[in-house]
Image: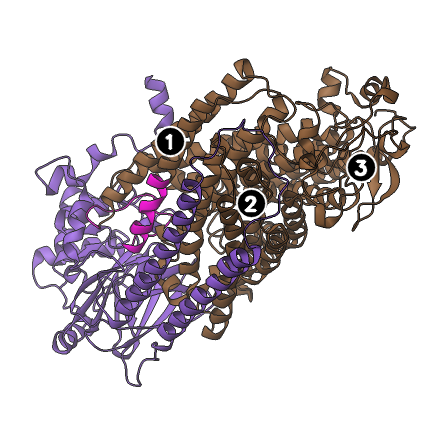
Amino acid sequence: MVSILALCRPFVNLGARRLHPAATSNTKDVNVPAALQLRAYYDRAPSTLATGSHDAHRLALLGIAMTVVATLIFFVVVGIIFVGLWRRRSAPRAPATAIETQRPIDVSENWWVLGGGLAMPVIVLAGVFLLTLSTMHAYAPAPPGSPEILVIGHQWWWEVRYPNDTVITANELHLPVGRAVRLELRSADVIHSFWAPNLEGKTDLIPGQQNEMVLRADSAGVYRAECAEFCGPQHAKMSLSIVAESADAYKQWLAIAKSPTVLPQSDSARAGLNVFMTHSCSSCHSIRGTAAAGIVGPDLTHFGSRTTLAGGSLPNTVGYLAGWISNPDLLKPGTKMPAIPMDGASLQAVVRYLEALK
Amino acid sequence: MTIARGNLAGLAERLDAQWSTPHSIYGWFATVDHKKIGIRYLITAFVFLLLGGTEAALMRAQLARPDGHIFSPEVYDQLFTMHGTTMIFWYASPMLSGFGNYLVPLLIGSRDMAFPRLNAFSYWSFVLSGVFVYVSFLAGAAPHGGWFAYVPYTDATYSPGLNMDFYALALLFLTISTTVGAINFVVTIFTMRAPGMSLSRMPLMMWSTLTTSVASIFALPSLTAALIFLELERRVGFRFFDATGGGTPLLWQHLFWVFGHPWVYIIVLPATGMASMMFPTFCRRPIVGHTYIALATVSTGLFGFGVWAHHMFATGMPLLSTTFFSAASMAVSVPSGMQVFAWLATIWAAKRHVYSTTFLFLLGFLLLFVIGGVSGVMTASVPYDWQVTDTYFVVAHLHYVLVGINLFPVIAAFYYWLPKMTGRLLNERLGRWNFWVMFLGANLTFFPMHFAGVRGMPRRIYTYPAGMGWDWLNMLETIGAAVFVVGILLFIINVIWSLRAGAPAGDNPWGASSLEWSTTSPPPEYNFDVIPVVRSREPLWDAPSPSPEASIPDYRVLDTGRRTLGTTVLDGQPQEVLRMPGDSLWPLAIALALAAMFTAVLLASVVAIVITGILVLACAGGWLWPQPEGAAS
């Protein structure tokens, strides 16, 4: 038995929960898995029905209209079947195989097949198609002067750039509420798909191709977007937060986001930066304002201000960050981030430093 | 239809001597009997159904609760990839080929398929390609890029290792099997129908088999090209799909879906054809709208080639192209509507209904078909597709289509035709349980997926965070999957029970109208001692002839060696006597040689590729070597 378990170990995460940092550092209840807290970071569940934009609202209405039509068709068919069976319920119980088939067809083939099976669907489909066209017609390009945001998909995180403001961030996208922004979608590796169910349908991010979409949130709030095209083992843990805020708040965020970080003043912060530079963190990550200029992983300049980490899969807290740095593969198996061996004091220092990067 | 058998004394014995395969290990491997091959197809495809089903059950176990971690993401990816690949390529299509192989010659009154050895080869290469792809699990490198295998994730940069090579090579191997099988069906149906069976009298299952076979022949080359490109890119450094080398990832998607969407119709149309055979039997009347169903079948096969890009609405295609594909995708549902209403009219116009298990499964099929059809129309609406594509809504839709229009008619067909194959009926009481449990399980599994998708749950995720509104839906789906598994087990128990204790079926237990019921259950190896003559669409429901035919023309007896009758394409007029080949080991040999060659390609050994390539050619030579009449080789 033991040997079978041992054989399974590479394939099955036996005991993973026991090792989970949630069980050791952040919560009192050892049975609460980490992600339970994630929902709290979004104002709405990521449902196409909990709409936060006019576009999504129209799409939801289109879906509801088609669902009503679909339900009607279904019940018409069910009705015909049941009435058809019911009206013969008292048929003589002749032997099952008795042949009673030499008679003319007693229903009108043309009415049934051409009327019910051809004309009716054509009329219904014409209606659905017109609804489709009118919904598509409501889409307009972003007005000139709209903010432009570059979204780059990576295995398994989102890079978000504001080219006009030299802002680079990750796994979060801020936009002014009630205003269209133009998203330029690119991929750094494989195909991903950008999907914010509350706000807009999907558009793929395809290597070698530049896709665009207009995103607009009409209600303020924090929405969850996710990758919708299978992109590898951690496709499930590749989400980003969309923060739709007032024009002032957006401007304020932009101002902070574009500023480089201030070089650390305190000894403990200096120690944290020192660990960051000497433990190869900086070969993948950038912190603008320091010498860290890696371009493989997310830019961490204002890391402390983000709500989640690891592609939106963990709350951005001291405990999770420490767990993430010391064993990323445990929290997100297959992640490209390597485990960085370091002693407890160094870990503490770098975590404190990063969390202070507001 | 009565036949004077008095002047045919000893005919059955003569035919038996000419057609029977020796009961030996040699005979087991060398047989070219379409019925044995058909049953092997059915059993093998059923095994793949169980494998694919097991993979699905494991996935449902993982997804039952949020943050499930029974399987690592890599293993989960292998499970969903192999589930889709197995079900679509090694279950759905071969299962229907199995019924086709068994039934086509019987339904058209022939003694075998047009190319019996090719038929045997088609089976052997199907089973060997399936073994090939499943060996990947033992090698710890099962395909993991989804059954659709989108590049660039599946190219060598992002998927090193043999995983996707197993996928590409196994599928290439399988396409050979499928293509020769399709050619065999087309030639058989066009040239070997019983005298009098004009195209207009041909059973509806022949229309659907013909349509899917022709569609396969035209759809598969696109897949073959895509797979060869993928292997060249992975192994040799070509850059068809690599954007950094001037390729484009969308080329793969176009090639794949130009094949993939017709394939959807290829794996449902034969099942609708089978349904059109079974409905009349249990409604005790000819089907309503025979000609319309035939037309609808053919036009679905044709339209199926014009809708592939509806899988790609979110790729940033120009809006004008998406509207075209949207309209085409809606239009393709119209012929399906015609078929549904023809079946509805048949039910409506029946004087009585026979509530057998088969009929219950057919009614279940109709309901699931309609749900899968209307959700398909919803995804054809471009902007709505932007929301629901790549979510569980599409998972729900495609499972309603494939479970509803493939699996339910297949189970119905087992209840209907297994007695013909084994001579024993299945248990009707257990059959009722089987139906209700499966019907409940299917709906409980797949209906909540619509809501999960609309509530934002993407496809192909190995886990999901709690509290997103998906938790209870997933729990329901997993419970449904467990119920569904029980339904499948009831079916297996019923088949085993029937083989041991089933009531004898007799020639025509259902009082059906088509030719396969005119011979014994199970049929003799030569199917018909006298080749039947067809005077209508329901030959066995014709009024009995007033007096037995006085004499039988020679071309319907053909007892001088393995012979059957060739007839004209349109009218089914007797045209020529066809000399049929004997048993042979060459089909197995060439399939084994091909398996060796694909293994050599997998291992990238040039020497082995050359040797096994020569072996394949040598086997082809052996196969084609002229044989004296009647000799087995």
CA distance for labels 1 and 3: 48 Å
Discs 1 and 3 carry the same chain letter: yes
Residue farthest to the right, as pictured? B628
Residue B455 in magenta? Answer: yes
CA distance for labels 2 and 3: 36 Å
Q: Which residues are magenta?
A: B443-468
Discs 1 and 2 carry the same chain letter: yes
Q: Quadrant of residue B184?
A: top right
Question: Which residue has dot 1 on it?
Answer: B437
Q: Is residue B422 above or below residue B391?
A: above
Q: Nearer the viewer, residue A99 or A184?
A: A99
Question: Which residue has dot 2 on it?
Answer: B272
Please report, as a chain letter, where disc 2 is located. Answer: B
Question: Which residue has dot 3 on it?
Answer: B620
Q: Is residue A121 above or below residue B608?
A: below
Figure chain in purple? A
Q: Can I make out residue A136 in this image?
A: yes
Side (left or right) of B506 relative to B578: left
Q: Position of residue A308 (x, y in %)?
A: 19, 55
CA distance for labels 1 and 2: 22 Å
How busy is the neighbourhood of tag 1: few (under 14 within 10 Å), some, or many (20 plus)? some
How busy is the neighbourhood of tag 2: few (under 14 within 10 Å), some, or many (20 plus)? many
Residue drawn at x 17%, y 68% is: A261
The reply to whether the C-beta atoms of the residues labelled 1 and 2 are less than 8 Å apart is: no
Figure chain in brown? B
Residue A314 in magenta? Answer: no
* Amino acid type, mark 1: Val
The reply to whether the C-beta atoms of the residues labelled 1 and 3 are less than 8 Å apart is: no
Q: Secondary structure under badge 1? A: helix
Please report, as a chain letter, where disc 1 is located. Answer: B
Badge 1 or badge 3: first in the primary sequence: 1
